[in-house]
Image (cartoon, rainbow, N blue to C red):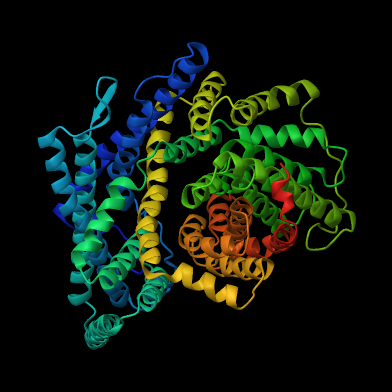
Amino acid sequence: METSDPHHNVLASTGVGRVLARVSRPLVQASALLVISLVLLIALDVFSRAVLSEPLRGVPELVSLSIPAIVFLALGHLFVEHKLIRADMLLRLLAERSVASADLLQSIFYSVGAAVMLSIVVPATRAFNYAITTDEFLGVEGEFTVPLWPSKFVVLVGSILLAALCLNAAWIHGRSYFFSSNAKSHRHRLIVSILTVGGVILAVSLALAVESRAAIGLSSIVLLFVFIYAGMPVAFALASSAGVGIALIKGKLWVAVETIALVADGSVSEYVFAAVPLFVLMGLVVGVADIGRDSLQATHWLLRRVKGGIGVATVAANAVFAAITGISIASAAIFSRIAVPPLIEHGFTPRFAVGLVAGTSVLGMLIPPSLLLIVYGLVAEVSISQLFLAAIIPGLILASAFAAGVMVAVGFRMRFAVTDKALPNIEDTIDARSALLKIVPVATLIAIVLGGIYGGIFTPTEAGAIGTLSATVIALAMRRTTMRELASLSVDAAAGSASILFLIIAASAFAIMLTLSGIPAYLSAQIGAADLGLVSYAIGYLLVLILLGMVLDSTSILLIMVPLAMPTVQALGGDLIWFGIVSVIGVEIGLLTPPLGLSVYAIKASLEDTTISLNDIFIGALPFIFIMLVVTCALIFYPQMTLQL
């Protein structure tokens, strides 16, 4: 059956696919159980250290081994639920014109994905056999030891499952391409097949003819962006282009295979990476507890005498919500439901209302604790605590600029922001006591998470565990969630964190290829010879981030661009903490720009008002994009804004 949806459920069309889908479910549940275990284990370790002055033995080892397990246990679920991160807009446009051509591309993509996962399977099988036959362990004998074979086994099982799913999908799309019922497209399919095969042969021939490492690296970068823009899952695009580059640079395919397998097992096997699933789960719990709604109502009451107060309250509530969750998409989805209707009711135009929610949602990735800052810190290998400290002032400046923009728009009665009718008087929907009660849970979580980090009580990773546990207790005490719902959230957290960490694994392989190619060193030397200053380079880098943000998600952009740009920034004397803040704001602008604009799509999906179009949201976000650009340029010209803390 033909369809214009490139992501229609291919698994349901074969018995093998249905079996594989059923297998993926208990595995992701095991991944969710590991996430919950991390919360409890790390929280217990913090408690033991604080109360008994004695940390629990083996916690770092157990946590580090759990991270790859969380990822690989959830990979099958990511595939089944179409949650592998990709930029598929061009693929969808192609599917509307030619289903057969989209099927061909999908078949190629999943074949590449299967090759990537099989390149992990072979070395992983050997590593598992070695671990189980030699009793390989992590830790110190006589103190604490953890056997490594369970972790090796999970990596192997997860890789086999995803490889099987990719092969099954490649077969189904390929079969659909060659045996479509649309007879008149046979000639078209034959021509496309010949051109595709010829193009692949030509590309391989040109790649083999290249001898310069830098040229090979550049070709791999071009291949990466071709794959991504065509619609291939970003992790597969990163890993496959890295594999091609490493194989050509070293002249041996097996070196590329071993490298990909090595990063799959070891690149995220560190304690600090636990911050990703912990903060993802914390954000989900905070969202289900309706803390965003409470923040909006309380700040609205506090600002009820300010002209356009509910608009300013939306900014303030989003800033407060950001200080708990650290996830922009969550803010966009939640506030589109709770803030847009009252904004329109109080005289704001629909475009400005949705634009305000879209713009202020980016605060979730800047005001600490920020998930994107955590990802940057892991990639750049800089202190996450220092990044959090450096982000406070820029985050407050950006929030203040948003609030000022709202007040100016209302004060001057700008037509794109407010309607012609007079703004109604804001009635007090709650009193001071109610506002205080609504702000207590929010203030408690902020005090626990940020107070613990900046007070030196625990690390950002430990803050994720303590914050998640605290948010869970608050949500249960307020009777806004149930244990069954929390179990479902843990599955979502496992899947969400696995999608990010899987990208980090693939990006690690790509970073190795870049290092081998010598491109970062070459670029640094060329920029140095051209006497290009840090400010000029940073502005050019910002423009590239914005352009990439039109088709890619924020995490993918960071993982691709930071390894490329970081050596040059250091050579020009730039501080990596400052560079991280600039990078995060730059990629966050991409959440508001067409055609991808993930925050915009999240708002559209959550809106109950069907009369508001995607175009309305993109247009409404333009003033806030301008504000973000102004603040980012100020940070570039005055780096001390991020460094004075």
Residue lying at the far left in this picture: please name it. 133
Q: Number of marks in the image?
A: 0
| Residue at 61% in and 69% down | 543
Where residue 591 appears, as percent x and y from the top left, is: 57, 58
Q: Quadrant of the C terminus?
A: top right
Specify the quadrant of the image occupied by residue 621.
Answer: bottom right
Image spot of residue 640 (x, y percent): 73, 51
Residue 113 versus residue 389 in the image, above or below: below
Q: Residue at x 25, y 63 (%)?
A: 256
| Residue depicted at x 40% and y 66% | 514
Q: Please state, as top left, top right, bottom left or bottom right, where the N terminus lies in the image.
A: bottom left
Residue 382 visible in the displayed image:
yes
472 or 427: which is nearer to us?
Answer: 472
290 to the left or right of 236:
right
User: Residue 44 placed where, x, y %?
Assistant: 44, 19
Dividing the picture into quadrants, the one containing residue 409 is bottom right
Answer yes or no: is residue 169 visible: no
Tell which of 318 and 152 is nearer to you: 152
Asked if residue 46 is positioned above or below residue 514 in the image, the reply reads above
Q: Is residue 376 above or below residue 521?
A: above
In-image side of 138 versus 507 (left or right): left
Q: Nearer the viewer, residue 531 or 290?
A: 531
Q: Is residue 517 above or below residue 578?
A: below
Residue 281 image position (x, y, % from top left): 46, 35
